Amino acid sequence: MGQQHRAWLILAHAYVRAAELDALIVRFGDMDSIVSAPQHDLKDAGLTAEKCAAIASPDDTKLGKALAWLEQESHHLVVYGQDNYPELLTQVPGQPLLLYVNGNVDSLFLPALAIVGSRNPTRGGLRNSVEFAKYLARQGFAIVSGLAEGIDTAAHRGALDVAGKTIAVLGHGIDRVYPAANRSLAHAIAQSGALVSEYPLGARPERWHFPERNRLISGLSLGTLVIEAARRSGSLITARLAAEQGREVFALPGSIHNPLARGCHALIRQGAKLVEAAGDITNELAPLTGHMVQNTTSSKRPDSLVADADHDYDELRTILSHDPVTIDELESQSGLTIDQLSSMLLILELHGEVESLSGGRYALSG
Amino acid sequence: MGQQHRAWLILAHAYVRAAELDALIVRFGDMDSIVSAPQHDLKDAGLTAEKCAAIASPDDTKLGKALAWLEQESHHLVVYGQDNYPELLTQVPGQPLLLYVNGNVDSLFLPALAIVGSRNPTRGGLRNSVEFAKYLARQGFAIVSGLAEGIDTAAHRGALDVAGKTIAVLGHGIDRVYPAANRSLAHAIAQSGALVSEYPLGARPERWHFPERNRLISGLSLGTLVIEAARRSGSLITARLAAEQGREVFALPGSIHNPLARGCHALIRQGAKLVEAAGDITNELAPLTGHMVQNTTSSKRPDSLVADADHDYDELRTILSHDPVTIDELESQSGLTIDQLSSMLLILELHGEVESLSGGRYALSG
């Protein structure tokens, strides 16, 4: 396996694309023959001189690091054309030659929904992201996002909160964490779902990586839901890529006075499905997933959960103090369910109002 | 004129419809001949026995009251097929035989927009109704609505507030005011615009009048804007009638947690234009009105952003060549940001126009 990985890594480090690999395999037969072929043969096969040189003289330090990384538990290489390569990505133009995966490779085969949006959302946007992620994760969808602050973080956390699967696609080497504040979140994602990157180990979060990365967020997913987004934003790129990949695009409408609803409205005008409740998404995707929408759907709709929320939040704030309390104690004092409390606490935590402490205890921050 | 009015009122009190009048005119020549024709001749012309009897024996008290009402200043009768009958209503199936008008008949010939919505709107909905009405009235649109509480009242008031024209279409006799709280508003509307009803004097605000009345609200207007509406509501009837009449339907989106956004979202899903700003409406209606959209709105137009984007792409294509350049070089040459460039380059790459090379460099393909 190490030898096999080595050949894939050499090609990846040389920026050989999946689209180029098919021709190389036809000509040389297998991976080992490709990486040991003379440069002029590689050139005849259509590779640029630069790529030929990189294959002929691979960077051994870089290779060694990648192979060492792969030896650690839960680290995987998913390569184009093999069984562990996600089917949905196969259909995506410009699919990556390989993916570095930290976590559970099987989670890449679940029916998945991308949830994306602004890094600076409104409180309502954050809450919607958490609630939609929770609902959809409970229904068995893997929640795909980009580990950015704001809507992405809320989506990942919502899925984790209900012990669902979530996948973070990174715009940098998988051995880095960016933003740094998401270190423990990244760890939790790797434990239950997967961190995914197509960039070599050590690759920095270059700006131009992110739109490129977005094609994987949409490409791994049956659909992309945009929660809140400004008119020109990365989320709209992801949505556009989803549409070009033939995937569903969903968008939440919002007040005309919320600048972060503008991107969503632009998408709806362009044909994105207007979503009011998570059931709108599961209904739309049901034919694709063979996924049964639960009868309980209507009673658990995110909007019904959130309807009385503002009042509930105020009440919860009065109960919380700087003395840590368990969620069970909060339950008995508030009359709210554990389910309600855990999502509300998560929202408050994302806003920095509440701190979660060991032993499932919570306290007001600061 | 009194004699002429008398004939029209006799037919209207007999519930003769505009669609029936054409055949009667062909047969009898003029209005006086119709109302003095023997019952059996009227029956031969296709009228029901009831209508024939009502024409043969008109209610003189009722007639007298209507004629007395018409003698007062600013009271008018607008009749089907004559010059003062609004052109847009002519095109509406089921158009009324006549309209009682209190106010300025000419205001029925202005380009008009209907603004409708809930009787129990949110504060934000009310504000939007006022603001859209103000903006559109300033642009020269007559604002048509139904004098109901809530969104309707706000729309009328918004128009009056900027000395614009507004038209209230009533579901009862024009000599009544309903709801009573709107007495002074009705008076102000009659002063500057018009109160309009197709019902006989004294007719009560029967429930079944209102959906019927709604076809006149939409029918007098180039388009109907729904500000806030529950899923099953009169406003959605008006919107549906507008669509059936071939008129534009506009709807404001709102928070998914606002039950009064549901009706608007349902309309948007069915094809209504999603409106964020009044400029969206004037732009849409400009070809119909020959109405000049002010320069100030163009900077807020959603599609102007798209137009800019296309221009940006063209510029980028002229800068790119087959010689690889870094994104930093493109930034300095194009005046676009790295963010914009990276997403544009990705789109071009997906279209096969651009190739991305190692080191974050880009070149034209092929």
Image (cartoon, coloured by chain):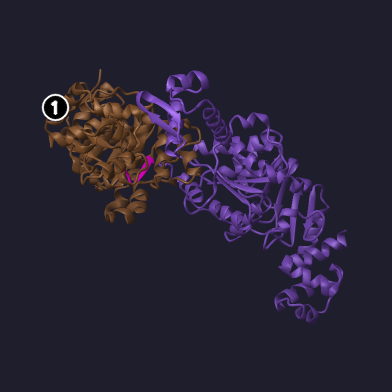
Chain colours: A brown, B purple
Tell me where residue A35 sits by quadrant: top left
State the quadrant of the C terminus of chain B: top left
Q: Is residue A315 left or right of residue A66?
A: right
> Residue B334: percent from the left, percent from the top?
52, 22
Tell me where residue B153 sits by quadrant: top right
Q: Which residue matches tag 1?
A: A68
Q: Is residue B30 left or right of residue A340?
A: right
Task: Report the span colored magenta.
Answer: A221-225
**Residue at (26%, 32%) from the top-left corner?**
A12
The chain carrying label 1 is A
Nearest the eye: A275 or A69: A69
> Residue B132: percent from the left, percent from the top?
60, 37
**Residue at (59%, 55%) from the top-left corner?**
B243
Crowd tier of the residue under label 1, counting other residues whose Cα lies within 10 Å: few below 14, some 14–19, many 20 or above: few
Secondary structure mostly taken by the magenta-highlighted segment of the chain: strand
Nearest the eye: A147 or B248: A147
> Can residue B81 be seen in this snapshot?
yes
**Residue at (77%, 81%) from the top-left corner?**
B44
Q: Is residue B152 left or right of residue A363?
A: right
> Residue B26: percent from the left, percent from the top?
82, 72
> Residue A206: percent from the left, percent from the top?
35, 23
**Residue at (23%, 46%) from the top-left corner?**
A109
In this view, B164 is above or below B174:
above
Query: How many labels sit on residues?
Result: 1
**Residue A188 on the magenta segment:** no
State the quadrant of the N terminus of chain B: bottom right
Q: Is residue B3 left or right of residue A322?
A: right
> Can residue A122 be seen in this snapshot?
no
Under mark 1, the amino acid is: Ala
